[in-house]
Image: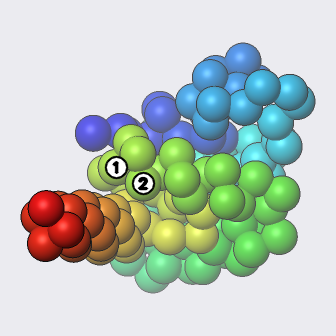
Amino acid sequence: MAHSLDHPSRLSLPEIEAAWLWKDDPPLPECTYDPELHTGPSHMIETSDERAAREAVAREVCTSCPALQFCYLYALRVRPTSGIWAGRTASEIDTAAQIVKLYEDMRRRAAELANAGAA
C-alpha cells in the first residue's frame, strides 16, 4: 500500500516518469507546488473541519491538473492509504480499484464462457 511519501507531490520527475510509465516529459502534477495540500500537514494535527477544507481545495486543484488521468491510473495501481489523489480520497480510490477489478474479472469470465461455448 502506498502512503503519502509515494504521492505524486513527493516524487521527483524521474520517479514520476517511472511510476507513470511515461516515456517523454510527463505532465508536472499541480500538487508538486503544495504537497501538504494533498498529503496533509507533516508536523501538526488538523481538525476534521480543517482536513475537510484542505481536501476540498486539493480536489479543486486536481480538476485542472494536466496529470489528472496519469495520477488516477497510478493511484489505482498503488492503492494509497491517505491523501488526495486525482481529486479522490484514498477510500474512493480503493472503491474504484475494487470496481475495476470486479469488471476485469467479469470480462475474463465472460471470455472464458464464450470460448467454452465455441468449443
* 25 shown above or below 100: above
From this viewpoint, which residue is outermost toward the top? 14
Left/right of residue 29 with respect to residue 15 in the rendered view: right
**Quarter of the image with the N terminus in it:** top left
Residue lying at 71% horizontally and 66% vertically, measured from the top left: 62
What residue type is disc 1 on? Arg
Q: Splitting the image into 4 quarters, where does residue 115 fall?
A: bottom left
Is residue 34 visible to us here? Answer: no
Q: Which disc, if any, is residue 76?
A: 2
Note whether 24 is above or below 32 in the view shown: above
- Per the image, the residue denoted by label 1 is 79
Residue 98 or residue 13, whichever sits in front: 98
Q: Residue furthest front?
A: 119
Tell me which residue sits at (66%, 50%) in the image: 70
The numbered disc on residue 51 is: none
Instruction: Name the residue rendered at 57%, 30% in the picture.
Output: 19
The residue lying furthest to the right in this view is 25
Q: Which amino acid is tagged 2?
A: Leu
Residue 89, percent from left and from top: 43, 68
Give residue 71's position: percent from left, percent from top.
61, 51
Secondary structure at numbered mark 1: loop
> With 112 as the anchor, is 13 left or right in this view?
right
Q: Is residue 64 visible?
A: yes
Give the residue displayed 25% in from the left and 65% down from the top.
111
Numbered-mark total: 2
Q: Quadrant of residue 82?
A: bottom left
Viewer-side residue, 112 vs 50: 112
